[in-house]
Amino acid sequence: MESTVMDQVAFQISSSSGGAEDKDIAIDRNGDVWITGEFGGSIDLDGDGEDDLISNGSFDSYVVKFDSEGKLVRAYDFGNTEILLPDKGIGIATDSNDNAWVLGGFHGSIDIDGDGKDDLTSSDRDGHYLAKFNSEGDFVQALEIHGRYTDHTESGKSIAIDSKDNVWTKGSFWRHLDIDGDGEDDLTNNGGGRDSYFAKFDSEGDLVNVFQIGGSGDDVGHGIAIDKDDHVWTTGSFSGSIDIDEDGKDDLTSNNGSDDGYVAKFDSEGALLFAKNIGGQDQDYSLDIATDSKGDVWVLGQFQGNIDIDGDGTNDLTDGSKEYPFPIDEYVAKFSSNGDFVKALKIGEHGEADHTEAIAIDSNDHLWVTGQFRGSIDLDGDGNNDLTSDSSFIDSYVAQFDSSGNLVQALKIGGSDGAVGVDIAADSNGNVWATGVSGTASTSTAMAAMI
């Protein structure tokens, strides 16, 4: 079911040396596009053949704003000058006033607005930043999320904003976490591997609260999303047992002691409403999450073997590859606002090169998925290939499903050097933007589609 729709606006972020990669994309109320990522060397943002940004060290973070027609509005790069210590943007989200908040990682000191003065200096050589830019693209403020072993994964949205413009972040940490950079630890690891956290900041960037999810095993926080009632949904992976609401009691236990995914819902203050396992007897992960207008959610994940998502004794997904010690088959699963399992789809078939990167939901409650594949790919699990590549390289894809999970259309994005889908976002006007990486020079390309 290949489609030729979707090619209304396209632009590329090109690097002739060092490479460039987008990590996240957000759309504001005006339809303007914000992108963050990392680059080395220099990059041309507007395709005029002239470099707009030059990195300070090996890789710098960048934040760039384009208008709804793809014209460059504003751009920033910031990073340290050391060759072996890269910096990168990881997540981005916009609020009701069209401000953009960016989450990323840095080392040493960084000057975000280019005024010659350092805006942040990591208290432990490496750290994470949360930075705010106003609707004009001007830098407003930044704070450090301190933890030497803190991790904000590139799988799933790590930042979200509610209707009151509170900013929520999701990640993982080892040992200790000082979330507001005041020099005092806000969380201490439970003693296993990593623990997950999610935190709430007000619209001025002041810490409101921080919450811990963890147990004796390795627990990784991946995605976070806010629904229509400002309820907070999170997803991630865990092994063993985890206490999600910090009451000292385990809320979930993984099957057979292996990694499971989970989905959890909290109220607007962070109180746990419910949590559910997603997994079977093998390795299973939950990586991304998105909410629709009814408060239902879709979860993106990976699985091995068979998994019974709703616990009714019948496997909802089967035959996940066990060729590798980690899962390579992927799924999207829908849950109602009450946490009831609705439907699951398997995407792809045992393809090491097949990978689903991100999901988004548009104003019509349609699900959009982006990722990569080689050869051919069955996107809806009906046994028929929906897309076929024209070359031996990896191609990117964008697929649209209706609210019931039926495939509506699919688009292949590729060329002589291949392409990889990275992220996807939808605005309130029915436009969908997808970003990706293409070419030997690691050209980052964004494109827009009208539903």
Image (cartoon, helix red, strand yellow):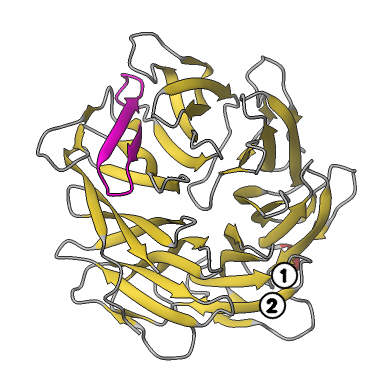
Camera sees residue 107:
yes
Q: Nearer the viewer, residue 420 or 291?
A: 291
- The amino acid marked with disc number 2 is Val
Give the x, y percent position of residue 382. 48, 90
The residue wearing badge 2 is 342
Q: Secondary structure at mark 1?
A: loop
Give the x, y percent position of residue 384. 40, 90
* Range drawn in magenta: 62-84
393, above or below 405, in the image = above
- The amino acid marked with disc number 1 is Ser
Q: Quadrant of residue 173?
A: top right
Give the x, y percent position of residue 35. 38, 42
- Horizontal side of 302 relative to 399 (left or right) equals right
Q: Is residue 64 magenta?
A: yes
- Horizontal side of 370 relative to 300 (left or right) equals left
Give the x, y percent position of residue 252. 81, 59
Camera sees residue 306:
no
Q: Secondary structure at mark 2?
A: strand
Tell me what residue is drawn at x 41 percent, y 82 percent: 378
Tell me what residue is drawn at x 46 percent, y 55 percent: 427
**Which mark identifies residue 229?**
none
**Which mark identifies residue 336?**
1
